């Protein structure tokens, strides 16, 4: 995958070129076909703004009919996950959505200490944030367990222990969904102090919805 820049900060847009050399099980691009993709860093979420399909060969070697014959073989259902994987590679851009979550010390969960109300509020917001910014095909529980340095089993246990006055889970236990309460919001804003405006302006920290914010 070819990227036109070496950074991907908030609100940045990147032009990405993908072809058959990038096929890895997540996507399949037929030979002689190239994808030109514009992506954007929207509050830590990689959004795909535009996809263009074009031939790699010159117009004298390939015609429109030939391009169209390759389209049925094109498989980009997991394109967002593929782009996420490549950008997250530590040898490259080392992108992580958690760089755009409010800075907080979550080691209380790793060390097995008793979480405070603020710990639970931030934990809940982190879960909601992950539901919003991670590609749909990525398991939120597994990603967050890795980030918090706990087992997936312990993460699920923590989810069940969140005080109900701070977080409300929606949907099935293993599905994405939920929102933090006003009590949790106030705890977080008190903690953030002068940085609370960034919390208020981020659409991914309070609730998860199927609505496409981008």
Image (cartoon, rainbow, N blue to C red):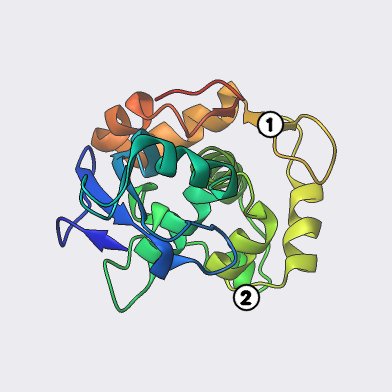
Q: Which residue is mark 1?
A: 178
Give the alpha-carbon distance from disc 1 to disc 2, as whole Å: 26 Å
Q: Which quadrant does the C terminus fall into?
A: top left
Residue at point 31%, 48% (across, down): 62
Between 115 and 206, the one lying in front of the other is 206
Q: Is residue 99 left or right of residue 81?
A: left
Residue at point 57%, 32% (across, down): 184
Task: Locate residue 86, reporting x and y percent.
Answer: 39, 65
Q: Secondary structure at mark 1?
A: strand
In primary-sequence order, the first of circles 1 and 2 is 2
Q: Is residue 152 left or right of residue 79?
A: right
> Which quadrant holds residue 195?
top left
- The reply to whether discs 1 and 2 touch (Cβ–Cβ < 8 Å) is no
Which dot, 1 or 2, sits closer to the camera?
Answer: 1
Q: Which residue is mark 2?
A: 111
Between 160 and 47, the one lying in front of the other is 47
Task: Locate residue 10, reporting x and y percent.
Answer: 24, 42
Looking at the image, residue 127 lies above or below residue 146: above
Q: Give the label on residue 67, or none.
A: none
Number of disc labels: 2
Label 1, residues with CA under 10 Å away: few <14, some 14-19, many ≥20: many
Residue extending furthest right? 172
Q: Secondary structure at mark 2?
A: loop
Looking at the image, residue 202 lies above or below residue 45: above
Label 2, residues with CA under 10 Å away: few <14, some 14-19, many ≥20: few
């Amino acid at each position: 995958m070819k990227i036109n820049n070496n950074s991907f900060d908030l609100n940045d847009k990147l032009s990405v070129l993908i072809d058959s050399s990038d096929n890895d099980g997540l996507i399949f691009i037929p030979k002689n076909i190239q994808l030109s993709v514009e992506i954007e860093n929207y509050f830590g979420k990689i959004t795909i703004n535009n996809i263009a399909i074009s031939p790699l060969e010159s117009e004298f070697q390939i015609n429109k009919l030939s391009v169209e014959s390759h389209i049925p073989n094109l498989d980009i259902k997991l394109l967002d996950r593929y782009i996420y994987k490549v950008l997250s590679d530590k040898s490259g851009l080392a992108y992580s959505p958690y760089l755009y979550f409010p800075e907080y010390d979550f080691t209380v969960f790793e060390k097995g200490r008793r979480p405070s109300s603020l710990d639970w509020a931030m934990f809940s917001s982190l879960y909601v944030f992950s539901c919003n910014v991670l590609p749909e095909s990525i398991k939120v529980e597994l990603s967050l367990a890795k980030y918090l340095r706990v087992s997936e089993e312990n993460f699920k246990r923590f989810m069940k222990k969140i005080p109900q006055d701070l977080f409300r889970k929606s949907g099935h236990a293993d599905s994405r969904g939920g929102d933090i309460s006003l009590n949790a919001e106030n705890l977080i804003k008190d903690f953030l102090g002068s940085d609370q405006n960034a919390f208020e302006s981020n659409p991914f920290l309070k609730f998860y919805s199927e609505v496409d914010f981008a």
